[in-house]
Image (cartoon, rainbow, N blue to C red):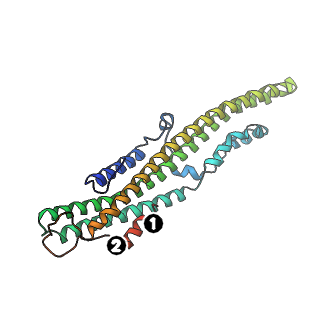
Amino acid sequence: MTATATDAGTIAALLNELRTTTNAIAGDEWLSSDLAATPKAPMSELGSNGKPLQALDSAGVGFLTPMISFLEEPLSQLRGNPDGVQQGASEFQTASKAATTLADEYGAKAGSETSDWTGDSAAEYAKTGKELVDGVLSVAETALTNATALIKAGEVVAQVVAEVTRLITEAVGKIVPIMTQAIAAAAATFGQSIAVAIPQCVQIAVECGARIAAKLGELLASGENLIKLVEGAQAVLKIVKQAMSVIGDKASGGTTSGEKPQGTAELPTISARDEASRDSQLV
């Protein structure tokens, strides 16, 4: 989307675009169809340390574990700290609330200090004030987009951790009876039953591994979709900031027509401190 700072509808349109992006992230529009159909899981799954292959030891067939240990490798790669995700999202949420408060305060101040102005210049000042408010709200929305993306990404990874664990548990459930029967028949078959059962069990593990790989592929593709949405939001914010740098000149008291507004007050501006605060976690 291209924009010019003098386009009255530019920043409002960009703000709406940012809100659409946030809604798309919150609504899981970036997920693959298969992953969207996968059962949800709590964020706490990220920090789980369960080892589903330990059930082989409990069943007395732990000697199989080294042969199919590859099944648990994705779990060690996916697991992380759910508190870290929550903390990162909380920081963006705090930034969003601060920027929203700033926009509300600025809008109220602009309205009260120019309420007695009249004429074309008054209308121009009001329009400029609205553009600046929408610009600050765009910063707030981008922070909210980032917070939403962090939470959603964490939830989906936790969802995949739970699904991989379920798949491994399902495979173990098929393997244990085969090996148990093979061990029971070992004496009568001089161990031949175990020799036959092991390839069968490994094949079950390989098939399970293929299903896990497919699920990881869905996670990767979905993650790429999410990154595109977040990068798109950052690109929109960059345009907003460029527009605001020009609009800010008008907010300092300049007018676009020869008519002077009635009253001596200038339209309130956003201080350098506020500028630094609103951008500190976004750029």
The residue that label 2 is drawn on is 271
Comparing 151 with 275, the one in front is 275
Disc 1 marks a residue whose amino acid type is Ser
Q: Residue at image x 50%, y 39%?
A: 39
Among the 4 quarters of the image, the one containing residue 124: bottom left
For residue 149, the mark is none
Graded by Cα atoms within 10 Å as few (under 14), some (14 to 19) or many (20 or more), the crowding at tag 1 reads few
- Amino acid under disc 2: Ser
Query: Which callout, 1 or 2, points at the residue further toward the start of the chain?
Result: 2
Q: Nearer the viewer, mark 1 or mark 2?
A: 2
Q: Does residue 36 lie above or below 253 as drawn?
A: above
Q: Which residue is mark 1?
A: 280
* Element under disc 2: loop
| Whole-number angstrom distance, CA of label 1 to CA of label 2 | 14 Å
Mark 2, Cα crowd under 10 Å, few <14 / some 14-19 / many 20+, is: few
Q: Residue furthest top?
A: 189
